[in-house]
Image (tube, helix red, strand yellow):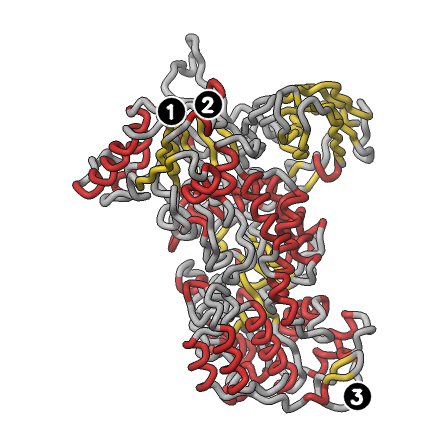
Amino acid sequence: MSTINIESDFNFKLKENKNKMKQKLFTISYLLLLFSTLSIAQTNSKIYKKGWNDLNKNGKMDVYENPNAPIDKRVEDLLSQMTMDEKTCQFGTIYGYKRVIKDIHPTEDWKKRIWKDGAGNLDEHMNGRAGIKPYLGFKEHAELMNEIQAWFLEETRLGIPVDFTCEGIRGVGYINASNFPNQTGIGATWDLDLVQRVGMVTGKEGKAVGYTNVYSPILDVSRDPRWGRAVECYGEDPYLVGEMGKAQVNGIQSAGMASTVKHFAAYSTPSGGRDGGCRTDPQVPFRDMHELLLAPFRKVFTETDVMGTMSSLNTYDGVPVTGSHYFLTELLRNQYGFKGYVVSDSGADFWQYTKHKTEPTVVDAIAKAYNAGLNVRTDFKSMEDLVQPLRDALKQGKVTEETVNARVADVLRVKFKLGLFDTPFVDADKAESIVHNKEHEAITLEAARKSIVLLKNQDNALPLDAKKIKTLLVTGPNANNIKPMISKYGPGLSKVITPLKGIKARLGKEVDVLYAKGCDHVDAMFPKSDVMHIAPNKEELAELNEAKEKAKLADAIVVVVGDDHFTTGEAHSRTSLNLPGHQSLLIQEMVKSGKPVTVVLMIGRAASINWTDQYVPGIMVSWFGGEKVGKAVAETLFGDYNPGGKLPVTFPSTVGQLPMAFPYRVKAWGGQSKKNDPNGWGQTRLVNPLYHFGHGLSYTTFEYNDLKISPANPSVNDTITISCTVKNTGNRDGDEVVQLYLRDQIASVSPFDQLLRGFERVTLKKGESRKVTFTINPKRDLEMLGLDNTWIVEPGVFEVGVGASSVDIKLKGEFNLR
């Protein structure tokens, strides 16, 4: 690490400032901070040897410094040299600039702070989250991370590197990185190759700017759409979530980054879908917890080499997960074979004392979590506050040295696997050519396109014919709103193409495009308006009337409605699934105009849009489609792109139907008796959802034929092959998501009505046919939790269904498992 040259930095700033469009620049505020920050010179440059680093500065290659030594031997050697203070420091997180710490660069004061003995990780440092400035360019941020890493190598006694962590569920959490759709939108693509490339981009860009570990993907299974964080989940089906999670993990880690999956465990079904300060008391039976909520985690932990997981804030059956030996050791490590390290969700261990009321003191809470299996503690506190309770627990005999050694070994093992001891720095000069390059930008557009789901297309209302439109009205609170595409768990800044901008760019001067907001996402009385009708006030009525007046001038209308970060997201659960505010009223008024209306749902959760479904012929979902959402929407509206996405969640007709998610136990969605029945009969409720899991239309048509199942009578050790031929029978090229469902006819425990056990998105030119093949491994795909709560595979007949959704089954067959 070289001494920072203030004069050259200043000249560099003045020169680069001439191009204000580039986000590669230091800001003036950064310069002021730079002048006021004491630069740390490279005082131990001799530690960097050819092929190894003399991290403990003793002039010889210790085992832990030997890149060719087995990792376990390196961990053992390093542990033997560490003091207890150094070991306990690996428990701590340094939260980044202005989140907790006040320094951008290392200072002399750092030698007086607790991390003089090292740190587990440094989280979200200078990533631009929450508008924290100054913003650094890609190269400058990479240089900063190299500088900080050099401080830990050179200024701490043993030179243990720090793990640089960051969020990354929509692309890495750094300003102007490649910005992808929310995870539900990615789930709607049903495209595992795409998901792996999204993960690869996330990993490459994160590493390019200096991060080493990304908190992604989220493996929570979204079973209640009222829950605010449903927007962050791939979907409601454990098989879909697990397969997508595997692809994302492999993509991220292929770039040399660690993937930390979250939130383990049983986090996504809080009572009543409530969030915020109520992330407790999940209402899910033990069997369903394992077969539904934990299934994606089990798959990722057993089928990938994932390096991290985040323990969740909630309880299960009254026991805080972060303090549960069952979850963090017996399940995670003993059964699932997890070899990485566990980081707490912010304050999850502390919650045992403050919220769950299961521990009498902070020290008891931290000891309980650490003994349960927690490795690294994260919270919005100073690192001293995070680590000291563990040291107090050691002094009081509540944690043993043996436990400390085991927990620290897990952290060190990951750091060795990442190569941080051997190649601790990134090539900052390459950052500009990696982050948001043309290849990555193209993948953001591909993801936006493939995430779009065509819900309804009555009488081929879509695509719109631009030649028949002279004036188009684009209206709705999300028509020209970039905020849904900006997430605190993804890039904090992004050049987003809104639907309005995308439509204008697509139509050019040939069509006069009008715009009126029409209404806000919520009304003045929200959320009370979720449970009772409240008429628009004067200001709201004025916005609505503007849209009505412009509708009179239009030949067609596109209404873009849905959510923003005030109606969905962390701590933003809902009481209703209807469109919030006066958005439904806006749609109704546009339909009353008599002009052709298309509705685009830019939503973060399933929505109950019964009136819209009844009266609007063309409806599509764009989700929070990332930086290119507007271009993708415009292309789909006007037929340049043929939608092929499928719903990864069920859309209930009403919130009163909840819980309503796929898969479900046999007959759980059964109707009422329609004849005289001694146990009651009648028709008093809506039975079916508005749109089923897996639903999604296309501008073309597909035909399924030639189902083959081999062998017909397999044993539990056989691989079962299921294939069919799919043909594009329409007049457009298009994508079809071929879905495989299995139904266990008889089981010792009431089985699920059907289970998704395979899917493939195929692109077919008009008239083209393709064979699609699925393989079933009975020990993996037909397992169930038996009566004694152990995993078993039971023999019997399994019905096979292949089709376009969970209810649109085109081909049926069966096999008899011996």
Could you say whether the residue bearing mark 2 is in a helix, strand or loop? loop
Q: Nearer the viewer, residue 563 or 397?
A: 563
What is the distance, in whole Å, between disc 2 and disc 3 at their CAs?
75 Å
Q: Amino acid at mark 1?
A: Pro
Q: Which amino acid lies under the numbered mark 3 shown in the image of this protein?
A: Lys
Crowding near pointer 2: few (<14 within 10 Å), some, many (20+)? some
Residue at image location 40% in from the left, 51% down from the top:
483
Where is 389 relative to 167, above or below? below
At 37% from the left and 37% from the top, the residue drawn is 513
Q: Which residue in the structure is indicated by mark 1?
A: 596
Q: Earlier in the sequence, mark 2 or mark 3?
A: 3
Q: Are marks 1 and 2 in contact (CB under 8 Å)?
A: yes
Q: How many marks?
A: 3
Residue at (50% x, 50% y) in the render: 627
- Which residue carries the number 2 mark? 461
Give amino acid for label 2. Ala
Along the line of sight, the residue nearer the viewer: 508 or 572? 508
Q: Quadrant of the C terminus?
A: top right
Of marks 3 and 1, the one in the foreground: 1
Residue 79, image quadrant? bottom right
Structural distance between the alpha carbons of marks 1 and 2? 8 Å
Residue where numbered disc 3 is placed: 60
Q: What percent of the width, then of the height, locates residue 563?
A: 39, 43
Q: Is residue 95 visible?
A: no
Residue 791 horizontal/vertical position (percent): 69, 41
Q: Which type of secondary structure does the marked residue at label 3 adopt?
A: loop
